[in-house]
Each structure stands twice: as structure tokens, then as C-alpha cells.
Amino acid sequence: MFDIKSFYEAVSVKDAIQALVKDTDAEIISGGTDVLIRVREGKDAGRSLVSIHNLEELKGVKLLEDGNLWIGAGTSFSHITNDPLIKEYIPMLGDAVDMVGGPQIRNTGTIGGNICNGATSADSASTMWTLEADVVLEGPEGERTVPVCEFYTGPGRTVRDRCEVCKGFVIRRESFEGWTGHYIKYGKRKAMEIATLGCAVRVKLSPDKKRIEDVRLGYGVAGPTPLRCLKAEEGLRGHDINDSDAIHAFGKDALTQVNPRTSWRASKEFRLQLIEELSKRALKEAIKKAGGKIDA
């Protein structure tokens, strides 16, 4: 049994906010794949839950009038993977969230919960960083937008106030138009495994597909929060896709901007090896998906 003080099903985002303000012991629950585990473990036992799981206004993917993509916070992983707009514009995100847990988790868990949980191991996190997504929050004081790179404040911590509801994510047109990407999740098992390391690379190639015009490199579990390696990105821009020295330096530069730790899943030293190697593997796959021809 779950030790829950009360359970309230909100009928709208504003209704959920009012319920959170009224009950100082309350917290948001959507899919429940993270919250209910914490309750069962006793970490959040005895608290009230305000459910936003059935709010249609928080679900789905749509192309906005300005050409940007909107992903509702209550959209399940399975929906994201199979959504036509995701497949057309950012299939990398669909591939990343398709690596979360098993089918039951992917059918229930939401991208909003995955990001708001604040875990550096979240499979969507490093990809969302390379997409430079904006997080849309609404609370008692109104709506605000926070860049995902400013959303995390530490392990399991974000800037979201307890009384705020994550409504969704905006991915700007310039962050996906002309870009391709690849995400690699390393784990000890092939299924239902929390990432030992996650690596996301996005590239924009020149019209002749021979030069890297732009690149983004993001990691999960390479530090206390997801992160971007801006120095590695800067060093690779403008290089030929088959410049082996530049690709080698790409992996080396990444090592200067990470801070992995030793855990029961892997040592710091092993994670550093993964950080260097996976950056190069993900880069090459991203280039191939963009139509570039890699010699090696």
C-alpha cells in the first residue's frame, strides 16, 4: 500500500495550482512512475498528491504558427516516439525516450515528469539540452519560460517551485530545421536500465554534406546535472566531416567540461572513457543520418 494523505484529480492547470497553494503538503503527480516509487520508499510518504495526469491541455505535440514545436508536459514517452511531427522533425528525441524503462513505463511516464524529476540520468535530458528546449511553467504568479540549460540546479533539483505546473516544452525552429542527431545510452543491460551514461550529438552540415557547420554535444550522468560541452562544439565547427584530428579533439575537449562521479553502476574513470568514445560514435552516426559520407 502507498502511504498517501490525500489524492486530488485536477480539472485544469489553474485548478492544480490552486490545490497546491491550498495544501502545503501537496505535490504534483502525472504518470507516477517516479513519485509513487518515492512514496513507497518512504521519502514522500504521508503527502497529498495533485494529479494532472488526465489534463488534455498538457498532452500532445503540435507545430505552432511561428514554426516552433510544442510538446505537452503530460505527453507519454510512447506518444512522443510515435508522433508524426516528432518523426519528421526530431526523431532523435523519439529514439531517446524509447529507451526509458519497459513498455509499461513508456506508456505511462511523461516527458514533463522525466525533466522535472531533475535526474541527470533522464534519457530525454541530454537530447533536450542539445535541442535548446524551453520549459514552460505556470504558477500562482503566472506563466514563465526557462531555458532547459538553466532549469537544473543540482542532483534531483530544478528551479520549478512546488506550486508551479510544467505545461510543456518549446523547441525553436532554428534548433531542428536542418539539424540531425543521434543519442547513445550506455547501460549494463539492453532493457529497463538507468543510464550509466547518455550522450547526445546534433549536427548541421553544409549544403554539400562535407563540412560541419554547427554541432551540439550533450551528456547525462557526466555531472550532477545534464550538461553541454561548449568548448568541444566550438572546436569542431567548420571542420570537414572526415577530419580525424578534429573528431579526436572533439572527444578530448569534452573531457575538460564534465565531472562524473563513481557510483555502483560505474567508476569515474570508466565514465570518462565513455564520455570520450561515445561523443565520437554519436557524432559519426549523426553525420551519417544527415547524409554525410564518413570514410571510416
Image (cartoon, grey):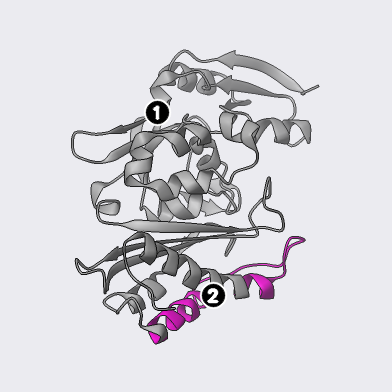
Residue bounds of the magenta highlight? 245-272
At label 1, which amino acid type do we have? Gly
Q: Nearer the viewer, residue 287 or 164?
A: 287
Q: Does residue 214 sit above or below 5 in this rendering?
A: below
Q: Residue 226 location in percent, x, y?
A: 51, 57
Q: Does residue 113 sit above or below 295 in this rendering?
A: above
Does the stretch in magenta take in 256?
Answer: yes
Q: Quadrant of the N terminus?
A: top right
Q: Residue at x 67, y 16 (%)?
A: 6
> Taking 239 as reference, is 93 left or right?
right
In what element is the residue under mark 2?
A: helix
Residue 54 visible in rendering: yes
Q: CA distance from mark 2 to mark 1?
A: 35 Å
The earlier-in-sequence mark between 2 and 1 is 1
Residue 44 visible in rendering: no
Q: Quadrant of the C terminus?
A: bottom left
Q: Residue at x 67, y 47 (%)?
A: 191
> Taking 93 as reference, is 205 left or right?
left
Q: Residues within 10 Å of mark 2 (few under 14, many from 20)?
A: some
Residue 19 - label: none
Q: Residues within 10 Å of mark 1 (few under 14, many from 20)?
A: some
Report the residue marked by disc 1. Answer: 60
- Count the marks: how many? 2
At label 2, which amino acid type do we have? Glu
Q: Residue 83 location in percent, x, y?
A: 40, 34
Report the residue marked by disc 2. Answer: 276
In what element is the residue under mark 1?
A: loop
Q: Nearer the viewer, residue 22 or 237?
A: 237
Q: Residue 118 location in percent, x, y?
A: 56, 47
Q: Does residue 226 sit above or below 93 in this rendering?
A: below
